[in-house]
Amino acid sequence: LFAGEWGYLRSCHAIDQLPATGPAEVAFAGRSNVGKSSLLNALTGRKQLARWSNTPGRTRALNLFARTDGVGPVVVDMPGYGYAKAPKVEVAAWTKLVFSYLRGRPNLRRVYLLIDARHGPKPVDVEAMGVMDEAAVSYQAVLTKADKIGKAAQREVVAATETALRRRAAAHPDVLLTSSVKNEGLDELRAAIATLVAE
Ligand code: GDP
C-alpha cells in the first residue's frame, strides 16, 4: 500500500469542497508541532508530501493525499490544534470544519491521533478524544518522537496513554509508538492502515 507513489489531491476549507464520497479515508490529527508532517512523509516515503499542508492558506484546511494510481485509501491531514497564538475566528472556523468532517464522513475509517511521546496526552488531546467519541469516530493513539525519550519513559507514556483511553466510553485499538526520525513503529502503522482499509 505504501510502496506506491503518493501525491497531493486537494485542500478543503469547507466541507462542501470534499469529494462527495469515495474510497476509504484515514485521517491524521494532533497538536501543532506533534510531528504529523514528518510522520506522513515517512509513511509515504515522500519527503515533501506533507509540506503542502504547511504552506500558507493550507494549515487550516483538510489536506488530502492519495496514491497517484488511486489504489488504497485517501489520507486526510487534519489541521493541527492547540496552537496558542491562533486568532479566535480561525480557531472557530477550523473547529467547525473538523467537527463537520468527523460527523458527516461515512467513508472515514479511523483517525490516527498523534501525541508527542515526551508529553503524553495533554488536555487538548483529551478534548480531541471527546470530540471523536461524540462523533462516534474510531481512533487510535500514535505516539510520536519516541526516539527523544528512553525505554522506561516510553513504557510510561504508553501506559499513561492507555489509561487516558480507558477512561473513554468506547474501546480503542493499541497505542502505537513511533519515530519518524529512527523509522520506528512505521511498519506497524502501515500494516494497521492496510488491514483497516482492506476490511
Ligand atoms: P507538525 O507541525 O505536526 O507537522 O510537525 P513536524 O512534522 O513539522 O515536526 C515538528 C518538529 O518535530 C520538527 O522539528 C521535526 O523535525 C521534529 N520531529 C518530527 N518527528 C520527529 C521524530 O520522530 N523524532 C524527532 N527527534 N523529531 C521529530
Image: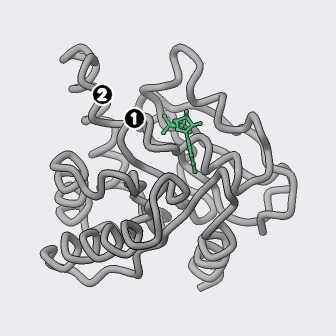
Q: Quadrant of residue 166?
A: bottom left
Q: Residues within 10 Å of mark 2 (few under 14, many from 20)?
A: few
Ligand 1 position by quadrant? top right
Say which residue appears at 20% left-offset and 45% top-offset. Answer: 124
138 vs 48: above or below? below
Q: Secondary structure at mark 2?
A: loop
Tag 2: amino acid:
Tyr
Q: Nearer the viewer, residue 146 or 55?
A: 146
Please say which color scheme the image uses. one colour
Image coordinates of residue 195 in percent, x first then y, are 62, 82
Q: Quadrant of residue 11?
A: top right
Say which residue appears at 67% left-offset and 45% top-offset. Answer: 65
23 vs 192: above or below? above
Q: Are marks 2 and 1 in contact (CB under 8 Å)?
A: yes
Image coordinates of residue 12 in percent, x first then y, are 51, 32
> Which label's residue is closer to the chain start, 2 or 1?
1
* Image mark for residue 188: none
123 vs 80: above or below? below
Q: Residues within 10 Å of mark 1 (few under 14, many from 20)?
A: some
Tag 1: amino acid:
Ser
Q: Secondary structure at mark 1?
A: loop
Say which residue appears at 48% left-offset and 72% top-offset. Answer: 176
Image quadrant for the C terminus?
A: bottom right
Please give the residue where the numbered disc 1 appears in the rendered image.
32
**Apparent side of residue 156 relative to residue 144 in the rendered image (left or right):** left
Q: Is mark 1 within 8 Å of ligand 1?
A: yes
Marks 2 and 1 sit apart, C-alpha to C-alpha, by 6 Å
Q: Nearer the viewer, residue 82 or 109?
A: 82
Say which residue appears at 25% left-offset and 52% top-offset. Answer: 125
Please give the residue where the numbered disc 2 appears in the rendered image.
83
Image coordinates of residue 130 in percent, x first then y, are 17, 59
